[in-house]
Image (cartoon, rainbow, N blue to C red):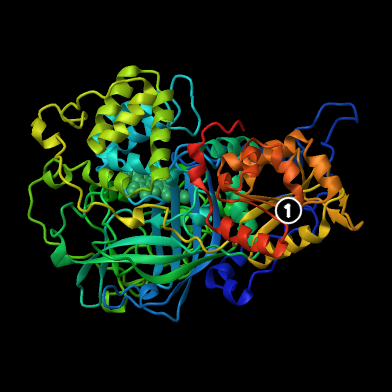
Amino acid sequence: MPIKKKSPDTSKVENTKTQDLARDIESSQNENLNTNQGVKINDDQNSLKAGNRGGTLMEDFILREKITHFDHERIPERVVHARGAGAHGTFQLYKSLAKYTKANFLTDTSMETPVFVRFSTVAGSRGSTDLARDVRGFAVKFYTQEGNFDLVGNNMPVFFIQDAIKFPDLIHAVKPEPHNEIPQAASAHDTFWDFISLMPESAHMIMWVMSDRAIPRSLRMMEGFGVHTFRLINKKGESHFVKFHWKPLLGVHSVAWDEAQNISGKDPDFHRRDLWEAIENGAFPEWELGVQIIPEADEHKYPFDLLDPTKLIPEEMVPVQRVGKLTLNRNPDNFFAETEQVAFHIGNVVPGIDFTNDPLLQGRLFSYTDTQLIRLGGPNFHEIPINRPVVPVHNNQRDGFMRQQINSGRTSYHPNSLGGGCPFQAGMMKGGFTSYAEKIDASKVRERSESFRDHFSQATLFYNSQSQPEKNHIVNALSFELGKVQTVAIRQRMLGILSLIDKDLAGQVGFKLGLAVPKPERPINKSIPADAPVEQYESKIVKPPLDKSAALSMAGTVKDTIKTRTIAVLAADGVNDVTLYTMKKALLNEGAMVHIIAPHLGNITGATKEQIPVDQSLLTAASVLYDAVYVPGGKGSVASLQNDADAIHFLNEAYKHCKAIAADADAGAVLEKTYFGKNLADKKAMTDGVLMMSDIKKLSREFISAIASHRFWEREAERKVPA
Ligand code: HDD
């Protein structure tokens, strides 16, 4: 469907970063073609030759320049998070955190801070599918008045490993296997599960990755987490621990696994496209920033270690305070210049925010600058427009590849007298950064803290907190992934790990794998150093901190809106255009998008002879790209659709993926041809979310509420839907 370019609300978009970027935006409108040296080009079609059938001449600087630049167009993709999509936006604080932090953008509620956000998958290459089962990156660059602050998080609140030294191992295990580079963007293979089965500390994260969180419906419908515990430092120099959260205003929603696999073929850009189109249509994605704040004195109050990145703080223990709103309101002008070249770094903090000793965080502090040096080709990547702060930069760093800044003056050292001592040190009172003076009295050791040895209690808490359909999805995901593993010993070892999370879970997966659940071995991190005492690496089995945490399930998420949902209308010539337009209007009024899908493109003729433009044909559309389906009546349309295998498949598949389906009463003949049509005769057997009636006003009302509830997972009990 053609996208309406809705000009963004300029009062919001005219932010300082947009103005800053404007300096570098090129437009070719009404301009000549030039060489990079500014020479006008007369002929861009023919190289310079000795005669029109002769050899090409070396002197053709226009040809050489064009080809040379092309030969160098690619840069290395990110070693992780290569596949991504980004957008510009703003952050508006509405509750000051001055009690806890001096960071300007978290204390001044009148301030709107420009941001750039990049979402990503972790394992796949740049060209891989958006719908891979994977963690999603959620990286936010705040261009604050005190410098850039990057919150480089994920859509899951915990991580696989406790110490950054294991990160290369984790990534080598999940990436395509090195001998044949298979499989792409998938964790369902031996090396990943080999590693995981030997690392009990990954048990909690594995529960998240095997849950529906790993197959989001939209990037706009997932939560974000800073993962680590950070510090907030206030004006008095006092420290509080903090966990950062992003809460999507549209709720947290996922697709079905079978659907995800289909989308990967039908539209591998599904998430990118969804984000892009929502922003172009003016349906700006929004999240609230949440913080969990823990006084320094409470550091050891919890049954888990705040420094352990495999643990979350249940919201029942420390509530999430919502303090501000992130809105994405502008698509990038150029994918490469902005989304590809943006360089995040967990170490980009501003005064008022500081690190903790989380050993994963500490290792990350090294990795991000280092990776940009190779990826972006030198030490001046901070000068790339998308990366530069909106405040001026003055220091004595000089030169290097691609230096943009022209530093004037004789001095590039400090102290100096020849330059009047400039640039001078700001001092704390003028906003200079000072690290939190954490007291440390310790021996240098390569050890894991005893407090990091509980690897299972929160994995169990997560599983226990899921609704029944969510639990089923975890069982199925594990059975799928381990089913793809070739080495039986790895499957068995994983069953041992699962049995420490939940015996029933392990039993169900074991059944699907045709394996008995083994007696769990002593769960020991198998990457134990040669001379270390085994006890130090053995998991401690302790009770979960609470029985259930509602926030961990997606079942209770926002379900009162159909804003930005895409609804398919199946129609053909002779369709009842009155009901079709009544329904369409009702859906549009609620902020949904509606696509009319017919056997052919162009127009269809309605029962009143009205010409109805078609958005997609049954050949180009697929039910997996839609949230719900409506079938209007009309004699000709019904006669055509009931004999159209693609239309029937569309409905069967939508049913299989538990989506809302609505039909006019006289479209029943189409539904009868579906697999679930047999239920229609018996009104009582009609599954929730399949609606058929002649009162179009009532039908649209009920359809809207069915779409808002997202999916009717109960249908999965009937496993035989052949779509
Ligand atoms: Fe990382 C990229 C998030 C652990 C090393 N990471 C990267 C991105 C996100 C995260 C969202 C993509 C940023 C973008 O869009 O450009 N990473 C995380 C989270 C982690 C984490 C939430 C754990 C809590 N990462 C982690 C560790 C290491 C790295 C432990 C290394 C020791 N991450 C990198 C990297 C990347 C990266 C190699 C690749 C591209 C980049 O940095 O810019 O440095």
Q: Position of residue 232 (x, y in %)?
A: 27, 67
Q: Residue at x 49, y 45 (%)?
A: 713
Looking at the image, can residue 92 be seen?
yes
Q: Residue at x 34, y 18 (%)?
A: 488
Q: Which residue is mark 1?
A: 664
Q: Residue at x 36, y 20 (%)?
A: 514
Q: Position of residue 218 (x, y in %)?
A: 54, 51
Q: Position of residue 690 (x, y in %)?
A: 61, 49
Q: Is residue 172 left or right of residue 91?
A: left
Q: Tell me if residue 180 comes above or below residue 263 in the rendering.
A: above
Q: Is residue 327 left or right of residue 146?
A: right
Q: Nearer the viewer, residue 244 or 165?
A: 244
Q: Residue at x 16, y 57 (%)?
A: 302
Q: Is residue 176 left or right of residue 427?
A: right
> Which residue is at the far bottom?
110
Q: Position of residue 320 (x, y in %)?
A: 32, 65
Looking at the image, can residue 399 be seen?
no
